[in-house]
């Protein structure tokens, strides 16, 4: 007993206050400042600024995915459905308000001033004429209100995740079966949205989202910077939120659920409640990331919700290193930027004489090989490099390391 009293060990650092958290946030702040200065000086294009802003949104979605998979052990293959729903919710307001700004002045030039019903009918004809309709579906009930649609950005993904998670977790569906269920949910939602009578313009999706109502005279270069700042702020706040969630007792329980769910349940913890909390919270944050992403992309359609998008999200987390928030963010940034470079024609084709390698066709093959190699040879991903650096920090063990009070073992415990 005397020995244990003489060896006070430092508690495990909380991720919310760990050095990696502040390093990440500092790097994010520097990155945002540098991009802002370079864009203001015309050193980088508006399109590239939008690409960087979209990458920040994908990083936030990857961090959320890491919490639900890397920390809680739920391999969700449907989180990009929440990402897309967030985009659809804000996209409805953007399309409605932009169309109203075009239709209302045109109708005002008629001899008789138009009524609100006539304006709404004209807006409906403009938006839904592409699918052979002019009536507003029920899902567009609050599309005229920015506040209501912002609330739906949170509520719709959150309620879907809450209902789905409650049904799945209370039935104690785990492992690959739960992954298949999440993928089936995503596929069912995508197939429904592909229909013209879904109320969201079917395969045409929502377009023109880059035109912010009321700011038509503001250059896209300025708007792209605004969204870059908003995306960076959302990523910083989301990272801090999740760093707090995975720290302390909450984080310990989540990791225990990941490692041995049956034992945690035996110890008296309500496992389903913890899993439902993590699943729902990450869905809400992913929906917010989607609401920031698609105004920068300019368009959203059901293909964005297809199961393959959620698989890509899992690949990003695996390559970056699951179980590390910064690893998931790095993996998403690296892979998404490389994807833009390879598929956008930035990578030069390789002429082998008998065959020319065109990266627009071979990028997915390269990505798949990278995922297989990481799984086989580097299961900790890019984030595992931090472990290699820390492993080299071997303490100097010269001196007395006995059990006596004041020995160097006590000092080592504080390091």
Image (tube, grey):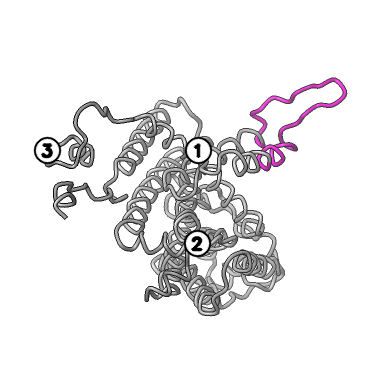
Q: Earlier in the sequence, mark 2 or mark 3?
A: 2
Q: Which residue is mark 3?
A: 406
**Residue at the far left in the pictured view:** 406
Q: In which quadrant will I find the C terminus?
A: top left
| Magenta stretch: includes residue 354 | yes
- The span from disc 2 to disc 3 (Cα, nearest Å) is 58 Å
Element at badge 1?
loop
Could you say which is closer to the camera, residue 411 or residue 366?
411
- Please state which of the two labelled residues, at mark 1 or mark 2, is closer to the viewer: 1
Drawn side of residue 404 relative to residue 305, left or right: left
Is 331 above or below relative to 272? above
Specify few, some or many for label 1: CA neighbours under 10 Å numbering under 14, 14-19, or 20 or more. many
Where residue 23 sits: x, y (%)? 32, 38
Element at badge 3?
loop
Specify few, some or many for label 3: CA neighbours under 10 Å numbering under 14, 14-19, or 20 or more. few
- The span from disc 3 to disc 1 (Cα, nearest Å) is 39 Å
Q: Which residue is mark 2?
A: 86
Q: Earlier in the sequence, mark 3 or mark 1?
A: 1
Is 250 above or below relative to 322? below
- The span from disc 1 to disc 2 (Cα, nearest Å) is 29 Å
Element at badge 2?
helix
Where residue 15 sits: x, y (%)? 32, 50
Q: Which residue is mark 1?
A: 382
Is 315 above or below relative to 40? below
Q: Which residues are magenta?
A: 343-368
- Residue at 11% across / 38% down in the picture? 406
Where residue 234 sits: x, y (%)? 38, 51
| Magenta stretch: includes residue 133 | no
């Amino acid at each position: 007993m005397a020995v244990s009293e003489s060896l006070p060990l430092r508690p495990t650092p909380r991720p919310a206050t760990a050095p990696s958290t502040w390093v990440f946030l500092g790097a994010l702040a520097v990155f945002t400042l540098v991009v802002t200065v370079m864009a203001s000086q015309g050193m980088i294009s508006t399109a590239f600024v939008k690409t960087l802003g979209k990458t920040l949104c994908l990083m936030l979605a990857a961090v959320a995915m890491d919490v639900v998979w890397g920390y809680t052990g739920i391999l969700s293959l449907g989180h990009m459905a929440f990402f897309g729903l967030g985009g659809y919710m804000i996209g409805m307001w953007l399309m409605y308000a932009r169309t109203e700004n075009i239709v209302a002045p045109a109708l005002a030039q008629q001899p008789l001033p138009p009524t609100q019903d006539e304006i709404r009918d004209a807006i409906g004809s403009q938006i839904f004429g592409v699918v052979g309709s002019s009536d507003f579906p029920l899902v567009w009930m609050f599309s005229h209100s920015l506040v209501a649609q912002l609330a739906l950005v949170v509520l719709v993904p959150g309620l879907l995740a809450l209902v789905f998670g409650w049904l799945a977790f209370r039935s104690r569906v785990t492992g690959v079966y739960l992954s298949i269920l999440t993928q089936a949910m995503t596929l069912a939602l995508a197939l429904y949205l592909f229909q013209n009578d879904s109320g969201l313009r079917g395969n045409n999706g929502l377009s023109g989202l880059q035109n912010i109502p009321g700011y038509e005279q503001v250059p896209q270069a300025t708007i792209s910077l605004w969204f870059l700042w908003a995306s960076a702020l959302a990523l910083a706040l989301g990272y801090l939120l999740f760093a707090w969630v995975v720290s302390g007792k909450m984080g310990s329980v989540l990791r225990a659920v990941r490692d041995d769910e049956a034992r945690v349940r035996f110890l008296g913890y309500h496992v389903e409640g913890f899993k439902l909390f993590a699943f729902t919270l990450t869905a809400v944050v992913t929906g917010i990331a989607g609401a920031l992403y698609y105004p920068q992309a300019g368009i959203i359609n059901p293909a964005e919700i297809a199961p393959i998008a959620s698989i890509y999200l899992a690949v990003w987390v695996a390559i970056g290193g699951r179980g590390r928030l910064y690893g998931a963010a790095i993996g998403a940034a690296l892979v998404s930027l490389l994807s833009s470079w390879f598929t956008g024609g930035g990578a030069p084709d390789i002429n082998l004489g008998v065959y020319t390698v065109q990266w627009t066709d071979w990028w997915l093959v390269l990505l798949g090989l990278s995922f297989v190699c990481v799984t086989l040879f580097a299961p900790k991903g890019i984030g595992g490099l931090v472990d290699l650096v820390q492993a080299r920090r071997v303490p100097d063990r010269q001196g007395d390391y006995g059990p006596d009070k004041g020995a160097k073992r006590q000092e080592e415990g504080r390091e």
